[in-house]
Amino acid sequence: SASIAIGNLQTALTQDFESGLGAWTVVNASTGGTTPAAVAWTLRTNPHVPGGGSSETINSGGGTQFVISNADLVGSGVAVDTSLISPAFSTVGYTSLSLNYRHYLRWLSGTSATVSVSTDGGTVWTPVQTFNTASVGAQAAFVPASVNLDAYVGNPSVQIRFRNVSGWNWYWNVDDIQLTGAAACPSADLSITKTDGSTTATAGTTVSYTVGYANAGPTS
């Protein structure tokens, strides 16, 4: 008998912003400047002119909408701290997990763009990816980013956070977020039995065997 387990790719969470933020939430703790509320993560339509001191035209290249946190709109004296937070999702039954998304970070010194994970409802966040040294991507060429999250499989409640912390700097744009991984299929307990009683064979002769099989496990 044999036990056979076959992994299959599953999507734990996906967000392309085509239907808005959905169950994702925005927390904006920014202070100072002229209008600190303006730096909060916001839906924008392709193509988008961010304004402020920028002459760029941003296009995510993925559908009609993306999200941006734009620190350039707020003015001198701002302390930017805004987060885009996913709904909770389960990774129970997963054997691997990865986060993939596309983004464009226009960086200026003092900017820290961080992806973090929480498994306790958002009380504690663990950084898993940080961009704080240079721009990433371009205004019409968002680049893919990925994070291995195998350490977070088997959790009943997982959340992802995109946090922009900076001063009066530029912006971070994000689109097409996906969390995927392998989940183990139920095992099939297969038994194969020779049932005709024959135990010998003569060289040069043909011997027919009767074989029975049974599946004592799940069918899918």
Image (cartoon, rainbow, N blue to C red):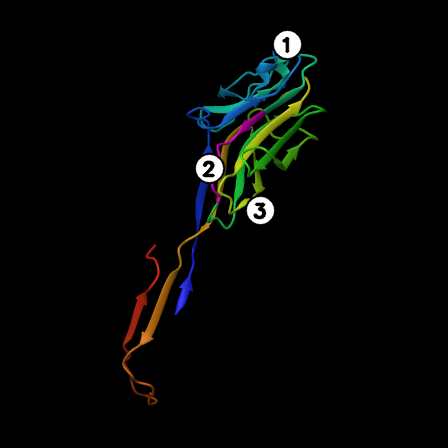
Up the image or down, 196 lies above or below 86; here it is below
Q: Position of residue 42 (x, y in %)?
A: 52, 20
Q: Gap in Å between the C-alphas at discs 2 and 1? A: 36 Å
In what element is the residue under mark 1? loop
40 sits left or right of 208 in the view: right
Up the image or down, 9 lies above or below 31; here it is below
Magenta span dominant secondary structure: loop
Residue at image coords 37%, 64%: 189
197 sits left or right of 93 in the view: left
Q: Position of residue 15 (x, y in %)?
A: 46, 31
Q: Which residues are magenta?
A: 83-91
Q: Gap in Å between the C-alphas at discs 3 and 2? A: 17 Å
* Residue situated furthest top in the rendering: 34
Q: Position of residue 142 (x, y in %)?
A: 56, 30
Amino acid type, residue under disc 1 in the picture: Thr
Q: Residues within 10 Å of mark 3 (few under 14, many from 20)?
A: few
Labels 2 and 1: the sequence-earlier one: 2
Q: Is residue 172 in view from this perspective?
A: no
Up the image or down, 210 lies above or below 11; here it is below
Amino acid type, residue under disc 2 in the picture: Leu
Q: Which residue is mark 1?
A: 34
Q: Which residue is mark 3?
A: 151
Q: Is residue 64 in view from this perspective?
A: yes
Q: Residues within 10 Å of mark 2 (few under 14, many from 20)?
A: some
Whether tag 2 and tag 1 are in contact, CB under 8 A, the answer is no
Up the image or down, 7 lies above or below 172; here it is below
